[in-house]
Amino acid sequence: MATGASRGVIFFVLLSVIVLGLASCDAGKGTKAAPEGLRGGETRPTLDPAMFTGLSAEAYQAAREIPEIIDSLYCYCDCEKHFGHKSLLTCFVDEHAVYCDICIYEALMARDLHRQGMDAAAIRKAVDERFGHLRHTDSH
């Protein structure tokens, strides 16, 4: 049985393969800012990435670098339903994301796609396709 750490590594490798596959597509080129209609409305600052290590720090840095993109994404850990979050960006204004692989990997995927030149709508579509089937269970 895989440990939590090895599952995270496997997930990250699979995510990287998906991102590389998406990189070969021409779709999504254009402006990188999220149109107002896509924004979740989170305005609070994210926590300092220096408070964290590893992938958590990278994800908090991504949220800090591209808040308009991260704010345009639904968080598939369903924190909107359970905690009233406005968007994925809300997960990074406190320590919520550091405990959630879904938040971390969504932010890292968005960062990577943004760096490849995809716009907010294309990033949102890719994240929705990749993470739409995931949900945390209520067994926490």
Image (cartoon, helix red, strand yellow):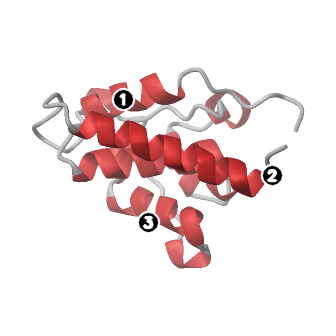
- Camera-nearest label, 3 or 2: 2
Q: Amino acid at mark 3?
A: Gln
Mark 1: secondary structure:
helix
Residue pointed to by mark 1: 126
Rendering quarter of residue 25: top left
Q: Residue at x 65, y 51 (%)?
A: 8
Q: Residue at x 35, y 35 (%)?
A: 39
Q: Amino acid at mark 2?
A: Thr
Rendering quarter of residue 137: top right
Instruction: For residue 100, say whether it is visible.
Output: no
Position of residue 66 in the picture relative to residue 106 (left or right) = left
Outermost residue toward the left in this view? 30
Residue pointed to by mark 2: 3
- Vertical arrangement, residue 45 with respect to residue 124, above or below: below
| Mark nearer the N terminus (3 vs 2) | 2
Q: Residue at x 60, y 42 (%)?
A: 102
- Camera-nearest label, 1 or 3: 1
Residue pointed to by mark 3: 61
- Within-10-Å neighbours for mark 2: few <14, some 14–19, many 20+: few
